[in-house]
Every structure is written in C-alpha cells, then in structure tokens.
Amino acid sequence: MSERLEDIAAAMVADGKGLLAADESSGTIKKRFDVIGVESTADSRRDYREMMFRAKVAMTRYISGVILYDETIRQNAADGTPLVDIIKATGAIPGIKVDAGAKPLAGYPGDTITEGLDGLRERLANYYKLGARFAKWRAVIDIDVAKGVPSATSIGSNAHALARYAALCQEAGIVPIVEPEVLMDGAHDIGTCYEISKATLTKLYTELYAARVVLEGTILKPNMVLAGKKSGKPSSPEEVAEKTIKLFRETVPAAIGGIAFLSGGQSDEEATANLNAINAIGPHPWKLTFSYGRALQAAPQKAWSGKAANVAAAQAAFAHRAHMNHLAALGKWQPELEQAA
C-alpha cells in the first residue's frame, strides 16, 4: 500500500467500497448495548467489533477502511492478534477518531465547537505508529431557525478547527476525513438544510485553502441535504439527490480525494436509498460512497446480542447491509434486493 496521502484517499473511496464507522465513544456504545441487553465492558466491546472485523465477505468486498475509537486501536482480539492487524488482513485501512467531542460554544447558546486540537500533533504521531493511516474529526452544526442557530461564528470556528486538524494530519502522514455534520434533528425544511450546508462548506474550503491543506489527500464526510426529522416533511431520495449534488457542485472542489457520506439519523434503508439516488444521477466529479456507523451496524448488533452462538448470523447481517451500500455506491441498488435477503 502506497503511503502517499492521495493514494490512501483514493483507496478509501475505491469503486463500491466504503468506510465502517466503528468509532463510537464508550458512552455511545453503552447506549447501543443497553438496547440489546449487553453489558458494555472492554471485552464485550472488543468481541462485538472483532465479530465485524472478522466478517470476511463484508470486509474484503465492501469495506475500504474502518474508523476506530482510541480504545479499539489499542485492543487485541480474543486470540491475541491486534485488531488493527485483523483489519489490515482484509485489505481495509485502519483509521482513528481524534476529536474530543462537541462542547457548548461560549457566548452562543445552542451552538457547539469541537475540541481536541491541544496535543493533537503528538497523538497523531502515536496513532500513525499504531497503524492509523486516516483520521476523523466531526464538527456539529445544529439548526434552530427561531434561535438563530447556527451562528456565523459557530460555522467559522468549526471550519477553522477542521482546517487546523487536517493540516496536522497531513503533516503526520495521515489522511484527514473532514466531517462538518449539519444535523437533521430539527424542524427545518430541506431548503434550510441546503442553505446552512452551503454556508458551512463554503467556509470549510476557505479555511482548508488558508491552512495549505492538500485537497487531493482529504476525504469529505458530509451530511446529505435532508429536511429536519421534526418537520414532518420527509424528502424523497430523488429530491435528496438533486439538492445534495447541486450543493456540492456549488461548494466542493473537484480536487478532493472523495466524498463518504455520514448516515446521520437516517434508517438503514433510507441511507442506502438516498446514496443510490445520488450515484444514479452521475457521473460526478468526485467518488461518492458511504461512511456509515449505525446504518451498517444496527442489524448486526441486534443479531449478535452478545452471544457467541450468534456471530455467524450477525456477520451475515453485516454483510447484507455492506452489500446494499456497495450497490448504492455504484448507483445499482434496488429496493427489491432488501426483501430478497
């Protein structure tokens, strides 16, 4: 595997392959485990993730890389093999979440700023030694029109932090995934999501240029353009695709390494259908694939439920979801294929 940033980025968005986001914090995975009645311990978290990383069909055919949490990148499998080595053996690239989470932005109620720049250079050097070749940093942009959220200050501060993070990653030989997530939690319509996403991406690329980040060695992890969940106006895959591509053509340079969407609260099938609709109206100047967490993992999690006897069933559920998203990344998914499984 080449160590050139551009080559790593290209491998991350290889045809029909996408990223498995397995970087849930200990708090988040505890919530997921509570739902399936599994106690969250270092061992149970390891067993669950090892089950996915050893799902040979899913990993070798459909997954280009795995975003890990700090605990996981240091863990060994039950037989003593480092989890990073299991991932590498499938041909997938290990990656690492490096931000310290979104905290309230002082002076701006309802806005957040993602923290974690302090000491990042040293942490990246350590993660590189542990095998990480890409990293992820998530900025969170909420929408509450009545309260004036997000503010221009919030968008600017988050874009600046993403650019500083990206520059440090590239200095360390690590491809930065820049993730400016405009949340779909609010009551806003799809047009509002479009405008806020446009302001965010415009500012993001201004800051990346200013930080001298090499765009070919970056991956964008954006939201799709969607109406807020509380709007009561669900958007069709065709409308999502049309508005999302219009947004990117106005704001995202053709030079970037690729685009890997977050699923951000969409259901499994919704995230697949929308990705498929986006790719079906191509060709586009960029590769457009998936970087899904819950939308790849909800089904295998439920099938596994913490029992060794369920590993094969859970791996089959993971392979199915990964296969559906593989097809969507090629614009070849059909709803009937979900029933066939």
Image (cartoon, rainbow, N blue to C red):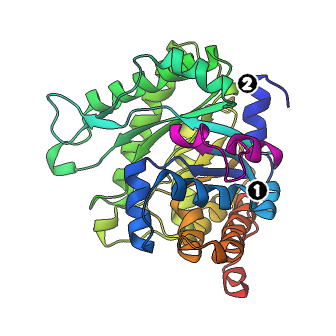
User: How crowded is the residue under tag 2: few (<14 C-alpha within 10 Å), some, or many (20+)?
Assistant: many
Q: Verify whether residue 85 appears in magenta.
A: yes
Quarter of the image that includes the N terminus: top right
Q: Is residue 321 visible?
A: yes
Q: What residue sits 54% from the left and 38% below the top?
A: 250
Q: Residue furthest bottom?
A: 339
255 relative to 77, above or below? above
Q: Residue 240: image x %, image y %?
A: 52, 61
| Residue closer to the observer: 299 or 86 | 86
Amino acid type at mark 2: Leu
Label 1 sits on what residue type?
Met
Instruction: Report which residue position mark 2 lands on.
Output: 5
Query: Which quarter of the figure is the C terminus placed in?
Result: bottom right
**What is the secondary structure assignment of the residue under circle 1?**
helix
- Whether the residues at callouts 2 and 1 have beta carbons within 8 Å, the answer is no
How far across and down, in percent of the image, does residue 94 sit?
68, 39
**Residue 304 in the image: above or below residue 140:** below
Q: In the drawing, does residue 142 fall left or right of residue 165?
A: left
Magenta-colored span: 67-89
Residue drawn where x is 28% and y is 58% of the image: 186
Neighbour tally class for label 1: few under 14, some 14-19, many 20 plus, Cα within 10 Å: many
**Labels 2 and 1: the sequence-earlier one:** 2
Dot 1 corresponds to which residue?
A: 59
